[in-house]
């Protein structure tokens, strides 16, 4: 079977930084220290201004008002800097950038129709087949799962994956249990058939030339689909107690499952990346997997829960850290309920 690689990754964030003490202005009894102690998040980024968030909280504005006024950044615009960073990295490594397919996965789309992948591809000037594969916060691993299968089947050669999220536009800012969790951001990945790639020995010195996708696995429990929802026209809500237990249990289990399937042990891992839900959950997972602190990569403390963009953004932020031969597990959970893992190795 053909081997498949991630050639490069990119990430980007909107300009507005929301620190924990901002939520004092919302009068929801959420002191900055309480947020940090409860979920380990210090700040997050938003496509909204602080003024717009305050106006949403007080009912002076609605999301529809912001959309009509063009004050919500589109997915394509949010993903553009991530794509630019990806192209810079790919070019430096000698990779050609000619995707014949774009896959997008997001929890908060611009459009019901057309596919948001089409809008993103158009914004970035990409002329190729494009479609959405959405699985909420699990989208990145599910997108890798689909892309790897399509490439190994021979249907496509090079695939661009985009995960752009704007949860801040679909939050109830009177609900302190959810509105302090989320941040906005985007990630982009370029996936290719390794059989059509000739490594350039002059590139990648001191770092990787890409990440091979050794294997992927995805699971769902459809009976739990109502535990994490954004209803049509509504705002985010979840059954927190159920979701927290599910997230920890399934993240540990799916990581062990994929390692065992590929005849590895936890001790073989160099790095672990989980769904960036909250730092307390991630630390619990890392402890249960007996990982050393330096093996656990995360960004949730600085960027909040970025939905499907969180895990790939962590990979992108640590791109220069990875070395050839490094084994990396990326395990995610999401609404659906869904969970999955991708096993990657530095090239």
Image (cartoon, rainbow, N blue to C red):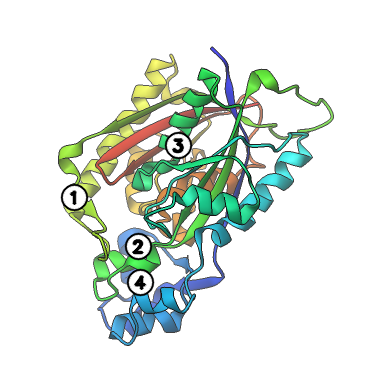
Which secondary structure, mark 3? helix
Residue 182 coordinates in the image, percent (x, y): 38, 62
Give the vertical position of 147 relative to 136 (above or below): above
Name the spot of residue 278 as percent of width and height, x first: 36, 54
- Which residue carries the number 1 mark? 227
Q: Residues within 10 Å of mark 3 (few under 14, many from 20)?
A: many
Q: What is the C-alpha distance between the residues marked 4 and 2?
A: 14 Å
Q: On the image, numbered disc 2 is attached to which residue?
A: 181
Which image quarter holds the C terminus? top right
> Could you tell me which residue is drawn at 43 percent across and 55 percent down?
306
Q: Residue 33: which numbered mark, if any?
A: 4
Closer to the eye: label 1 or 3: 3
In front: label 1 or label 4: 1
Tell me which numbered mark, 2 or 1, is placed earlier along the sequence.
2
Where is residue 162? Give x, y as percent: 52, 47
Which of disc 3 and disc 4 is earlier in sequence? Answer: 4
* Of pointers 2 and 3, the one earlier in the residue sequence: 3
> Which mark is in front, 2 or 1?
1
**Which of marks 3 and 1 precedes in the sequence?**
3
């Amino acid at each position: 079977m053909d081997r498949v690689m991630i050639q490069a990754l990119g990430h980007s964030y909107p300009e507005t930084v929301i620190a924990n003490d901002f939520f004092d202005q919302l009068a929801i009894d959420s002191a900055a220290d309480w947020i940090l102690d409860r979920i380990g998040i210090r700040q997050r980024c938003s496509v909204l201004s602080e003024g717009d968030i305050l106006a949403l909280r007080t009912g002076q504005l609605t999301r529809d008002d912001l959309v009509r006024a063009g004050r919500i950044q589109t997915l394509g615009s949010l993903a553009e800097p991530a794509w630019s960073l990806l192209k810079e990295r790919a070019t430096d490594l000698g990779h050609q950038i000619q995707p014949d397919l774009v896959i997008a996965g997001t929890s908060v789309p611009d459009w019901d129709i057309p596919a948001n992948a089409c809008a993103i591809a158009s914004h970035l000037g990409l002329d190729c087949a494009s479609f959405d594969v959405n699985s909420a916060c699990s989208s990145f691993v599910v997108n890798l799962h689909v892309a790897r299968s399509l490439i190994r089947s021979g249907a496509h050669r090079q695939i661009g994956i985009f995960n752009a999220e704007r949860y801040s536009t679909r939050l109830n800012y009177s609900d302190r249990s959810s509105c302090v969790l989320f941040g906005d951001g985007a990630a982009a990945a370029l996936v290719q058939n390794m059989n059509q790639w000739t490594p350039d020995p002059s590139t990648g010195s001191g770092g990787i030339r890409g990440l091979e996708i050794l294997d992927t696995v995805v699971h769902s429990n459809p009976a739990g689909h109502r535990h994490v929802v954004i209803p049509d026209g509504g705002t985010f809500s979840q059954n927190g107690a159920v979701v927290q237990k599910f997230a920890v249990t399934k993240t540990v289990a799916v990581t062990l499952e994929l390692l065992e399937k590929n005849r590895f042990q936890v001790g073989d891992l160099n790095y672990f990346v989980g769904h960036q839900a909250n730092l307390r959950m991630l630390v619990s997972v890392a402890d249960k997997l007996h990982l050393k602190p330096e093996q656990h990569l995360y960004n949730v403390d600085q960027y909040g829960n970025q939905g499907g963009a969180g895990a790939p953004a962590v990979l992108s932020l640590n791109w220069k850290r990875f070395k050839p031969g490094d084994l990396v597990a990326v395990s995610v959970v999401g609404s659906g309920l869904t969970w999955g893992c991708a096993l990657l190795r530095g090239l």
